[in-house]
């Protein structure tokens, strides 16, 4: 750059435009390289289109739905790789030099794995097996909790962290206490809002415990408020 900007402002702004264009070209070349490496390792990365089951029936899904039955073998790895490529683009857009910053050189891969196999795994993993047993005559209320809640707010993708309590009056069948934890964790590990999550927990318990007599209480801290602050 011209150290004395005032002497030749036209040349100064020309240099700004040139270096901005050059930086854009270098960024695009890096993105193409990352996409090539992902394709080279896992094959062509097709977008998920309409989700179709084995009978050819398509269905539209909400963000918080489980779609495990529509994911074929090997597609989770493809999805994770595609997400890593896209998140690398997010980091580049945020002007983060992942080539030279040792802290973020593998961040895109770590984030992709976190979303697919951890924080959003309730969308992609099959529902845990829940076995019901005959009720030997118990007709009173029993409760379990607190059950840990680790979910993600769909509005800002910030954490929802809290606890859940469940109350149930059984009818003809009962399920083991550990199954309450498994179902709650499976439903929580998706992007959603707390009201939707609480409703889904209640509906799942009605289905697996085979009783309408269900009460669910969720108390949680929303990091979209505590992390961002209320303005």
Image: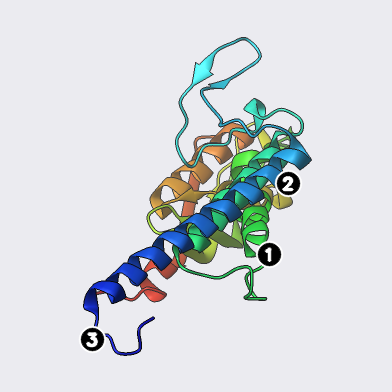
The residue sitting at 67% across, 34% down in the picture is 173
Residue 161's x, y, as percent?
52, 66
Q: Residue 144 placed where, x, y %?
A: 61, 58
At which x and y percent is residue 36? 68, 43
Q: Is residue 39 visible?
A: yes
Q: Secondary structure at mark 1?
A: loop
Distance, label 2 to label 3, CA atoms, is: 80 Å
Depth-wise, is mark 2 or mark 3 nearer the camera?
A: 3
What residue is shown at x 34% (from left), y 70% (from top)? 16
Point out the frontmost of discs 1 and 2.
1
Residue at image location 63% in from the left, 68% down from the top: 99
x%, y% of residue 86? 55, 49
Residue labelled with disc 3 = 7
The Cα–Cα distance between marks 1 and 2, rounded to whole angstroms, is 41 Å
Mark 2 / mark 3, whichever is N-terminal = 3
Q: Circle 2 sits on which residue?
A: 176
Q: Inspect this view and state whether residue 188 appears.
A: no
Q: Is residue 117 left or right of residue 89?
A: right
In which quadrant of the rendered view does residue 145 lie? bottom right
């Amino acid at each position: 750059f011209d150290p004395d900007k005032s002497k030749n402002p036209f040349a100064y702004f020309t240099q700004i435009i040139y270096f901005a264009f050059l930086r854009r070209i270098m960024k695009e070349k890096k993105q193409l390289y990352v996409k090539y490496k992902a394709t080279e390792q896992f094959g062509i990365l097709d977008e998920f289109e309409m989700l179709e089951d084995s009978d050819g029936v398509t269905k539209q899904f909400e963000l918080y739905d489980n779609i495990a039955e529509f994911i074929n073998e090997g597609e989770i790895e493809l999805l994770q790789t595609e997400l890593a490529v896209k998140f690398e683009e997010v980091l580049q857009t945020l002007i983060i030099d992942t080539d030279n910053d040792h802290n973020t050189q593998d961040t895109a891969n770590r984030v992709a794995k976190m979303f697919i196999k951890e924080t959003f795994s309730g969308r992609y993993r099959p529902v845990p097996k829940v076995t019901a047993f005959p009720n030997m005559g118990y007709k009173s209320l029993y409760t379990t909790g607190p059950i840990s809640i680790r979910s993600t707010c769909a509005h800002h993708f910030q954490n929802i962290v809290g606890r859940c309590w469940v109350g149930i009056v059984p009818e003809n069948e009962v399920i083991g206490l550990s199954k309450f934890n498994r179902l709650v964790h499976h439903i929580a590990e998706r992007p959603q809002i707390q009201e939707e999550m609480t409703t889904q927990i209640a509906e799942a318990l009605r289905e697996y415990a085979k009783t309408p007599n269900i009460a669910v209480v969720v108390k949680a801290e929303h990091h979209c408020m505590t992390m961002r602050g209320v303005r």
